[in-house]
Image: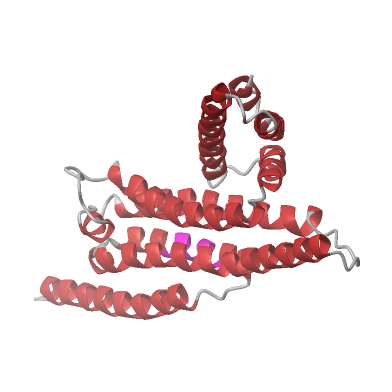
Amino acid sequence: DVAELVEKKEYFEAVDLILKSRKAAAKHREFACISDLTARLQDTLDLTEEKLDSVLSSLCYNFDANVFRKLRKAYTLLGKTQSAMEQLHMYYSSSINETSMNSLREYIKNNTDMKFQDMCNNIQPNKAPNCLLKLSENLFLIMKSYYLLYNWHMKYDTEETSSNNALDIEKNVSREYIRQKLKAGLSRIWLDVQSKVSIFLKNSGIEDYPFEKFVQILGVLRKLTQIAEVFCGDKSDVLQDFIKTNSVVYIKNYHRGRMEELKLFLE
């Protein structure tokens, strides 16, 4: 039973069963009942592929090498290895947007139908450090998942053939394309993450934070830049510039405020 195989995460076996059944049915297409059977098999295949896509998208949050290996084997049987990787990259991009929104929702009221930037504007200063930490932690899980995916391919998907066979050449080209796609994806993922964090910082009124909260924010940002360097070798220029510029501005304003307090005290 296909549904049972899918439930057991035997994706290759499920797809193989459908394709073999469809092939067997094609040999007897002269019978009227075969037409209905073929249609049902196609529906079953479509539903199975939808299930595969659903499982594939879940890997964005928690990469499981064993599950991915099974999925990849099934997609290879379907002849959709490359398109599955394209789809997976889209899922990662969507997961960053979805996770960013969800990370902020618990910190604000009346958050329905609000854009991410508007949500950032509604974060209270006393909640901002914890909110940024939550946002960063959740986005880090997606980065971790992608990093594990990338490493899996670098470790296990390296076998190339020197054959001039057209099929082998096509496999090598597809394999190299996926490698390059994954490598470029490291920077793309971090760019998306950095963008979300930057939007948060620019729209959450960081200049009005108490000093200790501001220091907490800087600590989170510093850790993020360190992670990014390991993740994709990026120096996080956007965040680094933000840290430098806003630290100088904040300290000047903080110093000015303390001097005014001292002046009032002396008077």
Pick the residue in front: 21 or 118.
21
From the viewer's perspective, tell me whether residue 36 is left or right of residue 98: right
Q: Is residue 212 above or below residue 105?
A: below
Q: Nearer the viewer, residue 1 or 61?
A: 1
Q: Residue at x 27, y 61 (%)?
A: 210
170 displayed left or right of 243: right
Hey, which residue is sitting farthest left in the picture? 267
Q: x, y percentage for residue 49? A: 55, 39
Position of residue 190 measured from the top left corner of the image (x, y, whole percent): 52, 65
Q: Position of residue 135 (x, y in %)?
A: 41, 52
Number of numbered labels in the structure image: 0
Check if residue 221 falls in the magenta segment: yes
**Looking at the image, which residue is at 29% across and 49% down?**
127
Work out which residue is located at the far right of the displayed protein and give it: 162
Residue at 21 percent of width and 58 percent of height: 118
Highlighted magenta segment, given as a residue range: 218-226
- The quadrant the C terminus occupies is bottom left
Q: Residue furthest front?
A: 30
Q: Nearer the viewer, residue 228 or 159?
A: 159
* Residue for point 33% across, 50% down: 101
User: Vertical placement of 166 versus 137: above or below?
Assistant: below
Colour mode of the rendering: secondary structure
Q: Is residue 3 magenta?
A: no
Q: Nearer the viewer, residue 201 or 71?
A: 71
Relative horizontal placement of residue 235, taking residue 150 as reference (left or right):
left
Q: Quadrant of residue 106?
A: top left
The quarter holding residue 32 reads: top right
190 left or right, relative to 160: left
Dominant secondary structure of the residues highlighted in magenta in the image: helix
Quadrant (top left, top right, bottom left, bottom right) of the N terminus: top right
